[in-house]
Image (cartoon, rainbow, N blue to C red):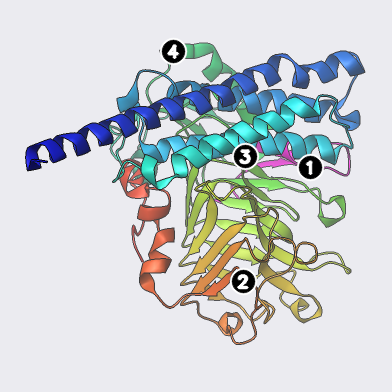
Amino acid sequence: MSCFLATFLLVLLATTENVVSCKKQIEVVEMAREGMLQAIMSWAQGFKVLNGPGLDSGSGGGAVTDCVKLYKEAEPRLARLVSNEKDEFSHDDAVTWLSGALASHISCLDGLAEKGLLLIEAQPAQNLTRVIREALAVYGAKSYRRGKRKVGRRPGLNNVGGLLASWDASTSKADIVVAQDGSGNYKTINEAVAALARLGQNRPERVVVYVKSGVYNEKVEIGRDLKNIMFVGDGIDKTIVTGNQNVHDGATTLNSATFGVSGDGFWARDMTFENTAGPQKHQAVALRVSSDLSVFYQCSFKGYQDTLLLHSLRQFYRNCQIYGTIDFIFGDASAVLQQCDIFVRKPMDHQSNMITAQGRDDPNTNTGISILNSRVMPAFDFRDVKGRFKSYLGRPWKKYSRTVFLKTDLDGLVDERGWKEWSGDFALSTLYYAEYMNTGIGASTGNRVKWPGFHVLSDINEANKFTVRNFIGGADWIPATGVPFWADL
């Protein structure tokens, strides 16, 4: 056989494999998309019919509403993956959006289980789980990878000149001003959000909402259609959004959030988001983020159990503060927290503290929590009593839970074992937990857990997988904010 013919056959074979690969990708994603559309129209909405119009959040209506909302947010991303606009997204985008679809589906099922609802149409739910996992497996297979990251166009993100970092209330101009004293366009945040929604496609590419100092007792939701919104306040503990909804009093974990964000490209700076329900009320979220390519800069998140819900998609936090007791940084996003202060608070007397509870539920998702160049320390109310309680870096909420602490200062409050089981030996061989070059009294790894999934890293190449550049592709989209960051270790 001539070299030319052999080369031709190899090229033909490679081309054929690529065509088959693309076809398989489209087929499985379309199946997942159809499953979500069916869920929206059929089994999720069916709960309302079966339970009647009087169903309230306490009896499970909130969980049903969550399901419909979650599927409506995830389905358009899957629709993009089966569209003809291939130049609009990269392979990383595809895996991220599929990971987000699975996170939304699992959140729906968790919410229903939280309320004790028997899944009436369990088979469609199982089918949807299966096809999303299959789609992730197809995209995750080596033969389907597309080499280096290709960044699609990000409308409204690349031409704002570092607005988030350069914002100055005395010189910068906001599109909307919220002020309780009447000196702005609106007195409440929700009035401003409603005004944004009314603008529709007439909104600027990047809308700036300036929220002046004050305590805003509001439940706020930035919907999926409100993209590229930027919130700025007057500083941590000056501009405060507060609430106290919680699971104990009838909310689901998801809808207990004081402030929820679903619109992509959300930026925030100089604000505090809190949930004051207290440790006795159990799950009570301060901030829930399901916004792709979102950035939080110089913000504070205060709560006890489940403070910060990194629900899904790519997120970056810089110079932020997070307060809590149990699982207070949790969810299934691809998230990097860099140069943040993590404050452990005093729990109830019978409780231990767990900083993280990452929710990765499939080995082909690209999700996890990466805590870099940060500090773990006791909050004011915990300083004098920290010796009475056990405090851990995290525990595995789901089977493939993934969390790393890199070059972070760990106070002596961290138990020598470092990590805590969720239940028995669940996930101990399938999780991925790692520590790399941490400092402080709590950083000693000599007596850490001996789980198969726990790693003390010594290889910088392994640790570099969890940096801003490699884990969330942040070097491609964070510079537009102007926020300082380290792309690598």
Q: Residues within 10 Å of mark 3 (few under 14, many from 20)?
A: many
Indicate which disc, 1 or 4, sits on the residue closer to the N terminus: 4
Q: Residues within 10 Å of mark 1 (few under 14, many from 20)?
A: many
Indicate which disc, 2 or 1, sits on the residue closer to the N terminus: 1
Q: In the rendering, at what x and y percent does residue 52 appear?
A: 91, 14
Magenta residues (range): 235-260
Disc 3 marks a residue whose amino acid type is Ala
Q: Spatial distance from mark 4 to mark 3, Cα to Cα?
A: 29 Å
Q: In the rendering, at what x and y percent does residue 482 appear?
A: 33, 46
In the picture, measured across the screen, residue 182 lies left or right of residue 200, that is right
Residue located beneath label 1 in the image: 244
Q: Can residue 226 be seen in this view?
A: no
Q: In the rendering, at what x and y percent does residue 63 appear?
A: 79, 30
Vertical placement of residue 112 versus 30, above or below: below
Vertical placement of residue 202 versus 472, above or below: above
Residue located beneath label 4 in the image: 201
In the picture, measured across the screen, residue 141 lies left or right of residue 344, that is left
Q: Spatial distance from mark 3 to mark 1, Cα to Cα?
A: 25 Å
Residue located beneath label 3 in the image: 103
- Disc 4 element: helix
Residue 293 colored in magenta in the image? no
Q: Do the residues labelled 2 and 1 touch (CB within 8 Å)?
A: no
Disc 4 marks a residue whose amino acid type is Gln
Residue 249 colored in magenta in the image? yes
- Numbered disc in front, either 2 or 1: 2
342 or 35: nearer the viewer: 35
Q: Do the residues labelled 2 and 3 touch (CB within 8 Å)?
A: no
Disc 1 marks a residue whose amino acid type is Asn
How many labels sit on residues? Answer: 4
- Disc 1 element: loop
Q: Spatial distance from mark 4 to mark 2, Cα to Cα?
A: 51 Å
Disc 2 marks a residue whose amino acid type is Pro
